[in-house]
Amino acid sequence: MKQEKNTFINPSDLFNPTNYGFSHIVQVPAETDLYFFAGQWASNVDGQLVSEDFEEQVRKTVSNVKTALAAVGMTTKNVVKQTIYMVDFTPEKKQLIKKVASQEWGTGIFPTSTIVPVPVLATAPGCLIELEIIATK
């Protein structure tokens, strides 16, 4: 499936990852500019955690990612890879991330994705999620 210049590939011999909100492979053309974004988390402009609620943190984290993308003229449609760092991983938290990702990406084409359970994040006490992305333009 094509999205702008990138090709998203989900081999038929692997499970369908789109049901989980990601793709197995993204092919990026050689002439494409790659942007690497630092991990974003649920911070306000003063670097303070906005909430201890996991869902609110996910939504604010995604909002911050969208703000970073917009600063360089991109949207979530430009994202080809995301790495999610999550404190106290549970299947319920994974489902919530999937729900938010489906709402935010909304195109049926999802970036490649990895979830990394961690014991603590270095961002702020009480921070439960950090999202690092790679995007193309």
Image: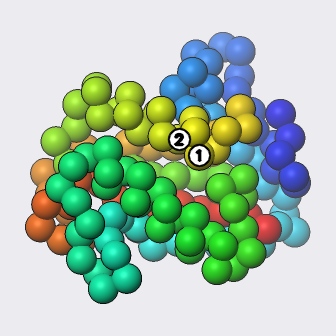
Task: Give me the disc on residue 101.
Answer: 2
Q: Is residue 112 above or below residue 62?
A: above
Residue at 57 percent across and 35 percent down: it is 102
What colour scheme does the image use? Answer: rainbow
Residue 11, percent from left and from top: 71, 22
Can residue 59 be seen from the camera position used here?
Answer: yes
Residue at 31 percent across and 55 percent down: it is 57
- In the picture provided, is 52 more to the left or to the right than 17? left
Q: Dot 2: few (<14), some (14–19), or many (≥20) neighbours within 10 Å?
A: many
Residue 48, percent from left and from top: 24, 77
Residue at 34 percent across and 59 percent down: it is 130
Residue farthest toward the bottom in the current orientation of the protein = 46
Q: Are marks 1 and 2 in contact (CB under 8 Å)?
A: yes
Q: Label 2 sits on what residue type?
A: Ala
- In the picture provided, is 37 more to the left or to the right than 88? right
Q: Is residue 31 above or below residue 9?
A: below
Query: Which of these two is toward me, 49 or 15?
Result: 49
Residue 10, percent from left and from top: 70, 27
Query: Which of these two is toward me, 25 or 4?
Result: 4
Q: Label 1 sits on what residue type?
A: Glu
Label 2 element class: helix
Q: Dot 1: few (<14), some (14–19), or many (≥20) neighbours within 10 Å?
A: some
- In the picture provided, is 121 more to the left or to the right than 21? left
Quadrant in the picture for the N terminus: top right
Picture quadrant where residue 61 is located: bottom left
Instruction: Please give the residue where the numbered disc 1 appears in the rendered image.
Output: 104
Picture quadrant where residue 105 is located: top right
Residue 13, percent from left and from top: 66, 14
